[in-house]
C-alpha cells in the first residue's frame, strides 16, 4: 500500500509542477499583484525577479520535488 500511495503522490507533484513559461509568468504576476505591487513599477519588477529566481538559478530542467536533469 505504501509504495502505491507514494507513487501517486509523486506523480501528482510532478504533474502540478509542469507549467509553461507563460503560465508561470501569469502565476507570478498574479502573486505580485496579490502582494499589492502595481504593474509597471520598479517594485513589481523586483517582485517578478524574486519569484523567478528559483527558475533562473537551476540549470537544466527540474520537475516534481526538486528532482531534475541538469548539466
Image: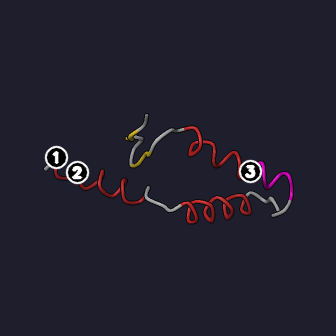
Horizontal and vertical percent position of residue 59: 50, 38
The residue at the point 86 percent across, 52 percent down is 42
Which element is circle 2 on? helix
Q: Is residue 42 left or right of residue 49?
A: right
Work out how far the residue at label 1 is from the one at label 3, CA to CA, in angstroms.
39 Å
The residue at the point 44 percent across, 55 percent down is 17
Q: Is residue 15 left or right of residue 37?
A: left
Q: Residue furthest left?
A: 1
Q: Residues within 10 Å of mark 1 (few under 14, many from 20)?
A: few
Q: Which residue is mark 2?
A: 7
Q: Main secondary structure of the magenta part?
A: helix
Work out how far the residue at label 3 is from the one at label 2, CA to CA, in angstroms.
35 Å
Q: Nearer the viewer, residue 58 or 34?
A: 58
Q: Which residue is mark 1?
A: 3
Q: Residue furthest front?
A: 71
Q: From the viewer's perspective, is residue 29 above or below residue 5?
A: below
Horizontal and vertical percent position of residue 35: 74, 57
Horizontal and vertical percent position of residue 33: 74, 63
Count up the numbered dots: 3
Q: Which residue is mark 3?
A: 47
Q: Which residues are magenta?
A: 41-47
Amino acid at each position: 500500500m505504501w509504495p502505491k500511495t507514494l507513487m501517486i503522490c509523486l506523480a501528482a507533484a510532478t504533474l502540478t509542477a509542469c507549467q509553461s513559461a507563460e503560465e508561470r509568468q501569469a502565476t507570478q504576476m498574479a502573486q505580485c499583484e496579490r502582494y499589492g505591487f502595481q504593474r509597471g513599477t520598479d517594485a513589481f519588477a523586483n517582485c517578478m525577479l524574486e519569484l523567478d529566481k528559483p527558475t533562473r538559478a537551476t540549470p537544466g530542467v527540474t520537475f516534481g520535488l526538486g528532482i531534475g536533469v541538469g548539466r
